C-alpha cells in the first residue's frame, strides 16, 4: 500500500513538472523577470519561474537521493522494531505461561528497542522475581530508572509492597522527578501509607483515586472502610479521633467495623460518652451482633444507662445472643449474678457460643462455685472447637423450656416481625 501511494505521488509530480515546462515554454512566461547567476566562471540567465522550478527540481533530487541513501538503514530499523515487538509478545506470553527464564531472556532482548523498552523491562523484573534472582531484578530496575523515572517508581513500589517493604515503596514513590504519580502509583502509595501506620494520610488519597477511577466501585468502597477503620484506631488523641470521625461520610459512620474502631479507640482514650453514643446510634440505625457484643464488653462504665438501652433493645431483639450476653455481663458488673445467669442460659439456648460460656465461668468463679466455673470454661473450649458442651446441673425442664422460649419480636412501630 505504501509503494502504491509513492508511485501515485511521483506520477503527480511528473505531471506537474510537464505542465510547468509547457507553461514556461510560452512567450508569456519569458517576461516574468530575469535571474542572473554567476558561479565558478559560468554565467546563467533565466526568468523567475524557471529559476523557481529549477530550485524545486534540485530539492526534489536531493530528497530522492537522501531516500535512496538511507533506504537500507530505514529498512534495518523497521526490521529491528518488528523483531523487538515479536520478542516482546513472545516474552509476555512466556511470562504468562510461567516460563520465567525464557521470558526474561526474550524481554531483555526486546528492551533494546527504545519504543518497547519500558514495558519490556517491567515485565523482565517480574520474570526475574518469579525465579528468585534478586540481582537480575535489581539490574532491570536500574536500567528502567535511567530510561523512565515514573515507570521505575511504580514498578519498584509494586515490587516492594509484594515483598512487604512498604517503607521502600514510599521511598520510591516520593522520589524527586516522579511527580505527579499516575493512578497506579497513587493506589500503591495509599497501600504503602496504610502499611506503615499512616492510614489518615492514605484516606486523603481516596479523592484522587475516585476521580481517576483507579479502582472499581466495590474495591474503592472496601478500601475506604478499611482505611477509615485503621485511621480511627491510629488516632493519637481525642481531638484527632473526633476530627477523623466527623469527616467520614454518614454511610461509613454506621458501618460495624468503623463504628467498632471508633468506640474502642474512644474507650481507650477515656472518652466514654462518645464510645457509648456511637454504638447506640449505630445499633438504633441497623442491628449488628458484633456491635451489641462490643457494647456489653466495652470497659467504659455507665452501667445503668447501658443496661437501660440494652433492655429497650430486648423488646425488638429478644432472640439476640449478643444482646443477652451483653445484658448478662452488665448485670454481673452491677452485682446481680442471679439475673446474669438467666440471661446467659437464654443466650445459650438461642445459639450463643464460647463467649457466653466464658462469661458464665467468670460469674461462677467470682461466686466461689469452682466446679461450675471449671465446667463452664471447659464448655467454652468445646464451643470454640465446634463441639457440643456438657449441660450444667440444676436446670429442670421448665427452666430449659423458658430459656428456649422467645418473645414475639416487634419493630419500632409495634408491628410483629416475621422470623425466618
Image: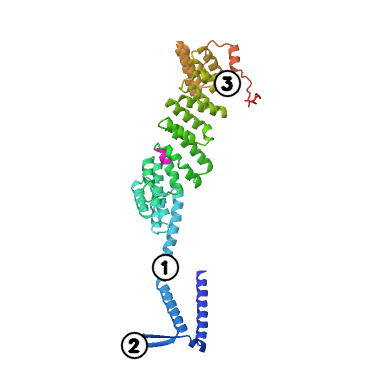
Above or below, 128 relative to 385: below
On the image, the x and y values in percent for residue 238 come to 43, 30
To which residue does mark 2 refer? 41
* Disc 3 to disc 2, C-alpha distance: 117 Å
Q: Is residue 260 left or right of residue 179?
A: right
Element at badge 1? helix
Q: Residues within 10 Å of mark 3 (few under 14, many from 20)?
A: few
To which residue does mark 1 refer? 74
Q: Residues within 10 Å of mark 1 (few under 14, many from 20)?
A: few
Which of the two residues, 94 or 417, is positioned nearer the viewer here? 417
Q: Are marks 3 and 2 in contact (CB under 8 Å)?
A: no
Q: So how many labels did they put on this image?
A: 3
* Disc 2 to disc 1, C-alpha distance: 40 Å
Q: Which residues are magenta?
A: 191-195
Which of pointers 2 and 1 indicates the residue nearer the eye?
Answer: 2
To which residue does mark 3 refer? 312
On the image, the x and y values in percent for residue 217 come to 53, 42
Looking at marks 3 and 2 on the same chain, the residue that comes earlier in the sequence is marked by 2
Amino acid at each position: 500500500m505504501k509503494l502504491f501511494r509513492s508511485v501515485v505521488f511521483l506520477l503527480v509530480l511528473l505531471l506537474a513538472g510537464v505542465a510547468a515546462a509547457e507553461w514556461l515554454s510560452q512567450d508569456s512566461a519569458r517576461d516574468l523577470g530575469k535571474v542572473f547567476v554567476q558561479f565558478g566562471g559560468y554565467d546563467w540567465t533565466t526568468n523567475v519561474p524557471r529559476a523557481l522550478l529549477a530550485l524545486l527540481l534540485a530539492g526534489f533530487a536531493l530528497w530522492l537521493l537522501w531516500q535512496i541513501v538511507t533506504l537500507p538503514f530505514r529498512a534495518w530499523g523497521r526490521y529491528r522494531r518488528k523483531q523487538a515487538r515479536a520478542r516482546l509478545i513472545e516474552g509476555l506470553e512466556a511470562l504468562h505461561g510461567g516460563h520465567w527464564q525464557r521470558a526474561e531472556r526474550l524481554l531483555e532482548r526486546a528492551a533494546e528497542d527504545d519504543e518497547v523498552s519500558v514495558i519490556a523491562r517491567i515485565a523482565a523484573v517480574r520474570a526475574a522475581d518469579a525465579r528468585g534472582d534478586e540481582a537480575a531484578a535489581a539490574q532491570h530496575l536500574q536500567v528502567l530508572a535511567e530510561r523512565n523515572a515514573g515507570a521505575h517508581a511504580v514498578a519498584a513500589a509494586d515490587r516492594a509492597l509484594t515483598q512487604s517493604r512498604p517503607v521502600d515503596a514510599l521511598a520510591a514513590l516520593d522520589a524527586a522527578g516522579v511527580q505527579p504519580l499516575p493512578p497506579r502509583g497513587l493506589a500503591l502509595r495509599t497501600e504503602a501509607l496504610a502499611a506503615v501506620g499512616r492510614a489518615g494520610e492514605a484516606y486523603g488519597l481516596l479523592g484522587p483515586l475516585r476521580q481517576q477511577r483507579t479502582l472499581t466501585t466495590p474495591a474503592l468502597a472496601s478500601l475506604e472502610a478499611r482505611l477509615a477503620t485503621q485511621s480511627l484506631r491510629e488516632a493519637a488523641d481525642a481531638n484527632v479521633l473526633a476530627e477523623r470521625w466527623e469527616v467520614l461520610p454518614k454511610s461509613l459512620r454506621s458501618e460495624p467495623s468503623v463504628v467498632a474502631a471508633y468506640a474502642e479507640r474512644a474507650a481507650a482514650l477515656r472518652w466514654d460518652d462518645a464510645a457509648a453514643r456511637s454504638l447506640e446510634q449505630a445499633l438504633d440505625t441497623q442491628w449488628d451482633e458484633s456491635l451489641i457484643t462490643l457494647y456489653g464488653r466495652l470497659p467504659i462504665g455507665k452501667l445503668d444507662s447501658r443496661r437501660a438501652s440494652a433492655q429497650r433493645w430486648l423488646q425488638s431483639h429478644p432472640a439476640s445472643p449478643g444482646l443477652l450476653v451483653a445484658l448478662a455481663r452488665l448485670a454481673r458488673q452491677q452485682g446481680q449474678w442471679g439475673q446474669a445467669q438467666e440471661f446467659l442460659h437464654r443466650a445459650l439456648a438461642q445459639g450463643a457460643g464460647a463467649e457466653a460460656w466464658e462469661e458464665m465461668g467468670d460469674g461462677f468463679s467470682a461466686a466461689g462455685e469452682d466446679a461450675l466455673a471449671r465446667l463452664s470454661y471447659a464448655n467454652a473450649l468445646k464451643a470454640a472447637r465446634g463441639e457440643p458442651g456438657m449441660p450444667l446441673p440444676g436446670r429442670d425442664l421448665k427452666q430449659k423450656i423458658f430459656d428456649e422460649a422467645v418473645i414475639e419480636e416487634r419493630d419500632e412501630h409495634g408491628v410483629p416481625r416475621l422470623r425466618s
